[in-house]
Image (spheres, rainbow, N blue to C red):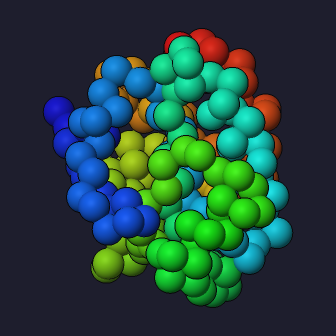
Amino acid sequence: MPSVYDFSAKSLAGDEVPLRRFESKVLLIVNTASKCGFTPQYQGLEALYREFAPRGLAVLGFPCNQFGGQEPGNAKEIGEFCASKYDVSFPMFEKIDVNGADAHPLYNFLKNEKSGLLGASIKWNFTKFLIDRAGNVAARHAPTTRPESLKKDIEALL
């Protein structure tokens, strides 16, 4: 049976990153955007990462421009925005599609494991997938779910 660890993705720097690198960690995988009403969630995601990384949490950000064109920047611009505006230190990946024919294989897996309000489709930016230490999708949270409200769920998996 496949797990999140069977996939890889390119970092903002363009390096191929096997997700097996995060094996045995709890993961919070989020499709992000820099010009969205939910963009301030970067602050909450970074706070979770800083609080729980020593105990085994990794937050993985996947920029996506499929919702209202709210992530128009290139990898360099996205990285600079995240660093300067929100001091993001968790891993960020290259911009991907999360829906449609060109959806990244990781997102096809995540959506098939936990459907949401729109079935298997991602509704909007900042949809969050919580992954247990075995690489299984434990939960899916809507864009409106504030990162800080996930603390109990994260602690239960750590």
Residue in front for this viewpoint, 78 or 125: 78
Q: Name above or below for residue 102 compared with residue 59.
A: below
Q: In the figure, is residue 42 to the left or right of 134?
A: right
x, y percent for residue 84 = 72, 63
Residue in front for this viewpoint, 75 or 19: 75
Location of residue 133 (image quadrant)? top left
Residue at horizontal 38 percent and vertical 43 percent from the top: 113
Residue at horizontal 55 percent and vertical 44 percent from the top: 90
x, y percent for residue 52 = 62, 22
Q: How many marks?
A: 0
Residue in front for this viewpoint, 88 or 148: 88
**Is residue 66 something one can see in this rendering?**
no
Q: Name above or below for residue 137 compared with residue 38.
A: above
x, y percent for residue 152 = 71, 19
Residue in front for this viewpoint, 82 or 132: 82
Residue at horizontal 67 percent and vertical 81 percent from the top: 70
Image quadrant where one finds the N terminus: top left
x, y percent for residue 71 = 61, 79
Q: In the figure, is residue 35 to the left or right of 129?
A: right
Location of residue 28 (image quadrant)? top right
**Is residue 23 something one can see in this rendering?**
yes
Residue at horizontal 69 percent and vertical 24 percent from the top: 51
